[in-house]
């Protein structure tokens, strides 16, 4: 199965970790985003994913003759009028062939294909297009499937938190500062 680079449809970013890797469940870090795409825009992507999943299943069956191979969970879910595609990339790791350590991050581009400045934080709700490859895997516990390996992201519409001061001043309750207690030392 060739690992060609595919380009997603435009979708809404859900919990993007594109500027800094998510290290909550994996200390090596992982860049990731779930892309919410309208089902009416997703038939070609679904066809591509499902074909890659079937190829991964056939490959696992060839490599593990005599064993019943189950299908791993799909890297997307369908809910109502939307399809939620999951993309991810390891932030750090060790190359299995060369045993060399590596560090990587997805390339981030704006709508005009210019690099996104490093200080730009991409928030959920941004409209994105992802460059990815579908990589087959097999584990006895999960089964055979594919993962959508993130390569680059094009930000079509940016949602960014520019002001952490969310509220305006209002008339009403006003807290009084706590008096500072003196530290007594011996």
Image (spheres, grey):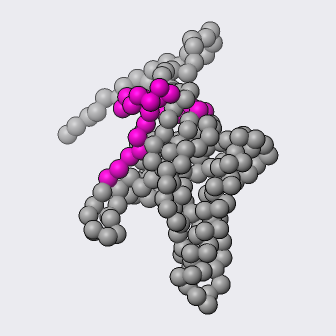
Left or right of 157, for residue 45 = right
Q: Is residue 28 visible?
A: yes
Query: Furthest-right residue in view?
Result: 80
Left or right of 43, for residue 5 = left
Q: Is residue 185 above or below residue 140?
A: above
The answer to which image quadrant residue 13 occupies is top right
Please state the horizontal and vertical placement of residue 20, each as a whole percent of the image.
Answer: 41, 43
Residue drawn at x 34%, y 61% is: 93
Query: Furthest-bottom residue in view?
Result: 66
Left or right of 157, for residue 27 = left
Look at the image and tell me in which quarter the C terminus lies.
top left
Left or right of 49, for residue 117 = left
Query: How many numbered dots are placed on residues in this image?
Result: 0
Please state the horizontal and vertical placement of residue 89, each as a whole percent of the image.
Answer: 45, 53
> Is 3 inside the magenta-drawn segment?
no
Q: Is residue 140 above or below residue 40?
A: below
Camera-side residue: 101 or 67? 67
Camera-side residue: 50 or 76? 50
Residue drawn at x 28%, y 61% is: 101
> Is 106 inside the magenta-drawn segment?
yes
Q: Is residue 86 above or below residue 126?
A: below
Specify start and end residues of the magenta stretch as a single range. Answer: 103-127
Residue drawn at x 49%, y 21% is: 163
Q: Is residue 83 visible?
A: no
Camera-side residue: 185 or 28? 28
Residue drawn at x 44%, y 33% is: 109
Q: Is residue 49 above or below residue 111?
A: below
Please state the horizontal and vertical placement of residue 141, each as a whole percent of the image.
Answer: 58, 77
Camera-side residue: 17 or 132? 132
Please state the horizontal and vertical placement of residue 134, each as a whole percent of the image.
Answer: 54, 58
Q: Main secondary structure of the magenta part?
A: loop
């Amino acid at each position: 199965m060739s690992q060609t680079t595919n380009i997603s449809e435009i979708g809404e970013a859900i919990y993007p970790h594109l500027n800094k890797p998510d290290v909550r469940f994996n200390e090596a870090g992982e860049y990731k985003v779930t892309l919410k795409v309208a089902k009416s825009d997703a038939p070609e992507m679904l066809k591509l994913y499902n074909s890659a999943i079937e190829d991964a299943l056939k490959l696992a069956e060839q490599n593990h003759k005599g064993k019943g191979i189950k299908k791993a969970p799909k890297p997307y879910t369908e809910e109502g009028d939307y399809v939620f595609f999951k993309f991810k990339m390891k932030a750090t790791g060790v190359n299995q062939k060369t045993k060399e350590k590596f560090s990587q991050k997805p390339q981030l581009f704006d709508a005009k294909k210019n690099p996104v400045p490093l200080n730009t934080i991409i928030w959920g709700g941004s409209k994105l297009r992802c460059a990815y490859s579908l990589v087959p895997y097999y584990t006895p516990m999960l089964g055979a499937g594919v993962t959508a390996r993130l390569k680059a992201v094009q930000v079509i519409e940016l949602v960014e938190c520019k002001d952490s001061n969310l509220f305006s001043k209002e008339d009403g309750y006003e807290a009084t500062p706590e008096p500072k207690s003196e530290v007594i030392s011996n």
